[in-house]
Image (cartoon, rainbow, N blue to C red):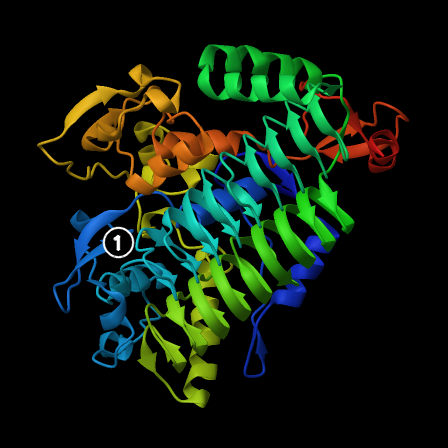
Amino acid sequence: MKQHCQNCSSDFTILDDDLAMLKKLSPVVGETTLHLPPPSLCPECRQQRRIAFRNDNHYYKNTCASCKKNVISIYSPDKGFTVYCHDCFWSDQWDGLTYGKDFDLSSSFFTQFSDLRKQVPRLCIFSTQSENSDYTVHSSRNKNCYMGSSLIDDEEVYFSDFVFSSSDSVDCFSCERMQLCYSCVLCEDCYNGHWLTLCFNVTDGMLCFDCKGCKRVLGCVGKRNASNEILNEKVQPEEFDRMSKKLLTDSVFRKEFEQKIETLRATVPVPNIWEIGSENCTGNYLLHCKNVHQGYNGKHFEDCRYGFEGHKNTDCCDFMRCGNNELLYNCANIIELISGVCCNLTYQCSSMLYCDNCHSSKDCFGCFGIRNKRYCILNKQYTKEEYEALVPKIVDAMRKEKTWGEFFPPELSSFGYNESKANEWYPLDQREALHRGWRWSEFEQALPDDLKAIDAKDIPDDIAEVPDDILNFILRCAISGKPYRLIPQELAFYRKIGLPVPKEAPLTRMMALQKRQTSRTLHKRSCAKCSKPIETTYGPERPEIVYCESCYLETVY
């Protein structure tokens, strides 16, 4: 069926399989099935709304409202939220039910939920079971990490996102089991690799794309089990060493070298979809997935649709940054939830509807900040019978407003659009964001007054020429002009590898990492070798030679 997006006004198609999934995911409360309607927004606008509820890169000094301890928080102090440190939040000294409200069927659900969430305390930053990793969010089991999101089982990983089981690495995105790596995207099992994209089992590599099982490779594309190669050509070890040093210490030479890599990439075929061990999937960057429709950057997805950046999800539709879940619809930032509709930041729960910041709870509707609860609505306790009678009435009222099944509206996000991850994926200026109903943050974290500022573009290319007292300076980003500072551990990492000090601020670098991926839109094309019809995120205007999976595998192996 055809649908007209209520946000961007584009037309989109709702497939029969989409409708079947909506039927499967429609929650049952008591004996009543709460049928989910077809979405009113196109897939991209649905994702934009969800991702605007996530802040990965902006950290603020705040104060615990309970014990008055200074904390690091993803919420700037000007927002007025009641923020608790970890000890106070997880203590028994408060209960989310204290803030419970009676539900008014004559008033909008979102209005009542908005009033509730303004009052309930919230955790300053989502980070658990970690040591010396205060500046990490949505992360767990880390040691000595800094400025990272979705870091799991990492040690000494800085300025990175969606990185698992890695160590001694900086500026990485969507990587796993990396060591001594810098500025890598969609890579696994690499050692001493820098500026790598879609590389697996690469050691001592730099500026490579789609390489596997390689050692000592520079600027190589599509290579398998190669060693001592530069731009896909065999070289002597001495020449490799000479080029490696020059690339690390001469930025002008490196830019010229990167142009040669782009010329090489235009001659090497790419697959229509980057996938490993996957079956019956569309989308891109899928590892060990099965029966996935429009999945992007997912691992171990099965029977999922419109899923973005997650791990181990089954029977889910329209979700972002979710892990170890089943039966989710239109959810974001979820861990271990079985059966959820339109939830955000909900962990270790089941049968949750329109809940946010909830933990270890079950059978709740429209709750915020509760723990270990069941049969609650707007943080008020009900009996099982009362809950099962009231929830269908609330859903009927939402159907009349045409909001049932829709994610929380933009004005309920806890962040300004420019603070959220949405601005990384779908950049908007302040005027356009406000016009579309988002908020905008103008809060600026104060920097020390006693530090001098220098332009990052003036920093020497050779790390050996950079003095230690650079730690005492504020650097101005060469692209955005935004101020940033180096931390001692970061400078030590650059010295250990011989890498140049980055001349861009961390957020600018993260935006650049995102751009090293293709779009999240599928285009119909034909295989450049056999002419078989294919779907791919490489648009027809792009220069890449795109092959179907069979032709690609025949070419590279």
- Residue 89 image point, x, y percent: 26, 71
- At x 33%, y 42%, the residue is 489
Percent across and percent down for residue 180 are: 50, 41
Does the image show residue 403?
A: yes
Q: Residue 99: horizontal and vertical position, in percent?
A: 23, 74
Picture residue at 72% right of the left edge, 33% below the top: 536
Q: Quadrant of residue 226?
A: top right
The residue beneath circle 1 is 73
Hey, which quadrant is residue 256 in on the image? top right
Closer to us: 438 or 222 = 222
Residue 437 showing in the rendered view: no
Which quadrant: the C terminus? top right
Q: Which residue is drawn at 22% across and 72% down?
A: 88
Quadrant of the rendered structure where residue 214 is? top right
In this view, the residue in front, 330 or 9, is 330
Question: Which residue occupies the extreme left position in the image?
Answer: 450
Left or right of 475? Residue 255 is right
Taking the image as shown, residue 546 lies to the left or right of residue 318, namely right
x then y, percent, for residue 63: 15, 58
